[in-house]
Image (cartoon, helix red, strand yellow):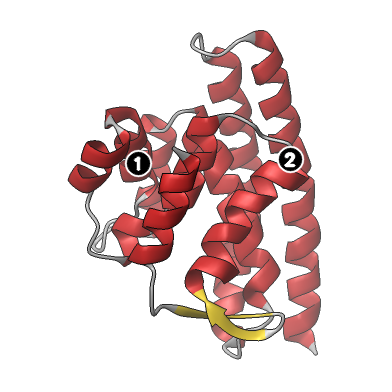
Amino acid sequence: MIERAIKTARECHKGQMRSGKNGPNTYFEEHVLMVYELLLEEENISDENILVVSLLHDVVEDTEYTCKNIEDDFGKSISECVDNLTKREEESFSDYALRLFEKGGYIEYIVKFADRLQNLRCMRYKDDKKWIEKKLIETERDIILYTEKGIDKISDSDIIDEELKKELINSISSMSKKIIYETDKNWNYIKE
């Protein structure tokens, strides 16, 4: 299923670009694949559903691929996770976060943390310092709540075993620290 998700995400994001450390790159390579690799390699996440959702997390928001397409190709649970992670066009970030807190499960929280961390790592390659400042303020406002809610969602989950719970809680804690570190690096960048 992971190989299929890689192929789907690559095809869906074809032609989209994003600035990164080495200049412009494809959105798939610079963001989607990096979120997946962050979870797999840095956080040692092996859960197939988490990894598939990480690969598909932006396809509905940024492409013509729909939740129905995801359901047909990957199943209802993957589709629901991606739907929960998809910010609606008319939705404020605060409303999006509230919806994610209410409906999202542990998969969405882990993927959202990795998504936020990867976004922070690429932020300083943008020229729009006002936009960066806005995103840093949002991150500082939300990180403690995200961490607490994420750990609560994982701890309260009765569908994952204790070993996976421990692994995911450690990942949330690890990524929270990395998010704080990257936020500080970005504040230093915009002050230059």
- Amino acid bearing label 1: Asn
Q: Residue 129, relative to residue 95: is it above or below?
A: below
Residue positioned 32% across, 60% down in the render: 61
For disc 2, the neighbor class at 10 Å (few under 14, some 14 to 19, many from 20) is some
96 left or right of 24?
left
Residue annotated with mark 2: 43
Residue positioned 35% across, 50% down in the render: 95
Give SS at disc 1: helix
Between 96 and 81, the residue placed more toward the observer is 81
Q: How many marks?
A: 2
Q: Compare marks 2 and 1 and give the one earlier in the sequence.
A: 2
Residue 12 rendering spot, x and y as whole percentages? 34, 64
Q: Residue 5, relative to residue 165: is it above or below?
A: below
Quarter containing the C terminus: bottom right
Residue 177 rendering spot, x and y as whole percentages? 79, 47
Residue positioned 49% across, 11% down in the render: 159
Using the rendered view, name the quadrant where residue 30 is placed. bottom right
Residue 16 rendering spot, x and y as whole percentages? 41, 78
- Please give the label number shown on residue 161: none
Using the rendered view, name the quadrant where residue 98 is placed. top left
- Amino acid bearing label 2: Glu
Residue positioned 57% across, 59% down in the render: 33
As measured in the structure, the alpha-carbon distance from the residue carrying label 2 to the one carrying label 1 is 22 Å
110 left or right of 170?
left
Is any atom of residue 139 visible in this view? no
Give SS at disc 2: loop
Residue extending furthest left? 68
Residue 39 rendering spot, x and y as whole percentages? 66, 44
Is any atom of residue 1 visible in this view? yes
Residue annotated with mark 1: 84
